[in-house]
Amino acid sequence: MKIAQKIIYITLLFSCLLGIKTSNAQQLKGYVYDAYAQPLNAVYLYNINSEQHAHTAENGYFVLDNNTVGDTLSIGLLGFKKQKVVLTAADLKDGLQIALESNIFKLDEVVLAEEVNVLNTFAKLDLETNPINSSQEILRKVPGLIIGQHAGGGKAEQLFLRGFDIDHGTDVSINVDGIPVNNVSHAHGQGYSDLHFVIPETINNINFGKGPYYANAKDFTTAGYIDFKTKNRLEENIVKLSYGQFNTIRTLGLFNLLDKQKSESAYFGMEYIETDGPFNSSQNFNRVNLIGKYTTYFNDRDRLSLTASHFKSRWDASGQIPNRAVNRGLIDRFGAIDDTEGGNTSRSLVNAEYSTTVNDNTTFKGNAFYTYYDFELYSNFTFFLEDPINGDQIKQKEARNTYGFNTALNTQYNLGNTTIETTAGVGLRYDNIEGVELSRTLNRNTTLEFLQLGDVNQTNAFAYYDAEFDFGKLKVTPGVRLEYFKFLYNDALAETYSTQSERKTAILPKLQVQYNQKDNLQWFFKTGIGFHSNDARVVVAQQGEDILPKAYGVDLGSVWKPLPKLALNATAWYLFLEQEFVYVGDAGIVEPSGKTERLGLDLGLRYQFNKHLYFDTDTTLTKARSVNNNNGENYIPLAPNFTLVGGLALQDYKGFSGGLRYRFLDDRAANEDYTVTAEGYFVTDFNLNYKLNTHLSIGVAIENIFNTEWNETQFLTESRLQNETESVEEIHFTPGTPFNAKANITYTF
């Protein structure tokens, strides 16, 4: 009898400690849909009585513990009207089906404690209030990210983030629907990321994170990662035509193939762009994008999406020009020393995405993809420095097949009042790159000399695991990522055939901590180890030594809503890199830069005056230095030290919508001792649209509305003009777009 009593006492004690209800509390299951019966992901469900909460999975499914008849449930997702439901016995027995009505995005509806990632929620709010109108604007939606174009619009943009001159993607991971955009061991440079294959109107969401803190983030995640998600369905068909200065034309068509079906959707899209650009020598630029996507839902638990797309672009370019040529009056700002630069590129891809609810606590998602990509670029950075007769034009070329898959298994369960969510994933990426070429050429049609030529085979297998412990106000998420690389390179210029091969493995721990002090105040701490990604030709040149140098980072920040319509965020951060080997594709050489450190402050502000008027701004302060060099000689060339971006958006006011956007990049060092300056700029863009009726709208978009004279990209380069006897090292630049107006007309149905 005493033993039985002890067992009862121990059971009651553990019940109290773990907060287990001994009443008739039950588990609630169900789905959340939109008005078109399409599942909604990341919907927040909160039981006001039991204080239990849950989020829906990608197929809209949720499981919520500790519910009783009469409890009130609050259901919310940004962009939809909040609902409250009083639970009945039938709900608990048969499950709950909830349909949310769409609504204008409102900042005052954002409750910090309800959001999975608040800064990403802000990015989604920015995306809705300031729609993307061009592929160049896609990356500008990431706070603190600055881009620059310097090759006629067809080349991938140069990126700047967190004190990195990322070139075209060396230290930021970019993905679309799970497909990596960064090209490893690329002919022009490691991580080359061309997002021009994405039609901006098909983007549904942007997910990003800064720093090396995320177990699920792929190769190149040093400064951060950016994941884009395309729409599964279109709300309406769109036909759009734009025409502007410099013979600029853009046409767009997006069409539903299955109209408002509950269980499936499909659409097709085509975009065509051409322009001569503001340069004296026409860019002759054109681009075509095609996309088709089919999505089906079955068994109430499964979703399958199939996507196919094709992109092709060609252009001529005036290239970077030296200051002295403009100052002497040899050319104007939009002139050229060698206007035979340019190139062409294409990308074709297929992608299959699958997600399912395995059981009440477990979901699975994955995708498998294939891309074919080719690239050919002609450049001339030094003019007649190396070859005073033929000039220094170079060609970079490659053709690649990329295969891969990603998987993630997510499990949630409760231990008393603690919710534990684990995610485990594995994946593979294999690149087969044929004819990676660097050669000297003449007039884009004569090859004078091969500098490098070979084939690359690169394999990246990875696995990761993280576990989020949700204690209510406090969330702790430790994680770990395992990376495996195999690099193969066959040098076609070697006298005898041989395969250079190296392998490397890295184990990368991560930790994130989030504390919701109040519903309007959140703190977060992040730390982790990443690595600087390197080209296969760097790896074999280094014989596998120090070729995955570690990156150590830490973030400390907060998000605060002092007023319902005002949100502030601040993050102090630090990042240390053991080494940065850089493969300079333009020269075919490896440049080690040694140890580096970067520290900075990210600040953001968002204020919604009313449902029509929305203001946002983000600023970054950064100090980037080389550790090995003496003070005053340790600047990292072109690393940004101060940026400011933001604007004012007008949404659906008496038929008018539009916005004023600005971006500022401060002066920065162009060399290690800051004796040469890369000049900053402040540029403002404007757009305004008016809805004539339910289906028809007209608008105007103006780039550089104040016609600011600015340099979009700048490099300190040694070059020689044809009539010069000695070379000169100075700033070479690509002029930024002058005042550029475009009119557009849009028809929706």
Image: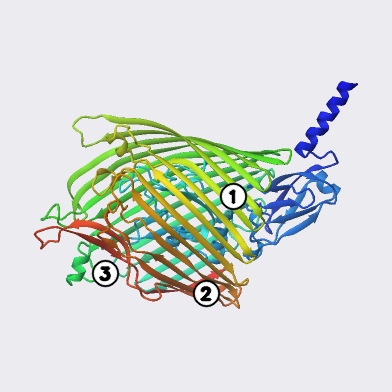
Amino acid tagged 1? Thr
Name which residue type carries label 2: Asn
Tell me the quadrant of the picture where the C terminus can be found: bottom right
Vertical comparison of 460 with 688: above or below? above
Name which of mark 3 and mark 2 comes first in the sequence: 3
**Residue 705, image x, y percentages:** 41, 75
Q: Disc 1 marks which residue?
A: 295
Tell me: residue 21, above or below residue 270.
Answer: above
Q: Dot 2: what SS?
A: strand
Left or right of 273: which side holds 521? right
Task: Give the spatial CA distance, label 1 vs label 2.
Answer: 31 Å
Q: Tag 2: Cα neighbours inside 10 Å, few (<14), some, or many (≥20)?
A: many
Q: Which residue is mark 3?
A: 334
SS class of the residue under badge 1? strand
Number of the front mark, 3 or 2: 3
Q: Which mark is residue 585?
A: none
Question: In the image, which is nearer the foreground, mark 1 or mark 2?
Answer: 2
Q: Is there CB contact under 8 Å for labels 1 and 2?
A: no
Q: State the CA–CA distance, disc 3 to disc 2.
A: 31 Å
On the image, the x and y values in percent for residue 148 come to: 36, 60
Q: How is the image coloured?
A: rainbow
Label 3 element class: loop
Look at the picture and state if 273 lies above or below 391.
Answer: below
Picture coordinates of residue 444, whole percent (x, y): 22, 55
Few, some or many residues within 10 Å of mark 3 (<14, 14–19, 20+): many
Answer above or below: position of 118 versus 239: above
Q: Mark 1 Cα within 10 Å, few/some/many (few <14, many 20+)?
A: many
Circle nearer the N terminus (1, 2) = 1
Sequence order check, earlier mark of 1 and 3:
1
Callout 3–callout 2 Cβ contact below 8 Å: no
Read off the residue under disc 2.
689
Instruction: Quadrant for residue 423, please give it.
Output: top right
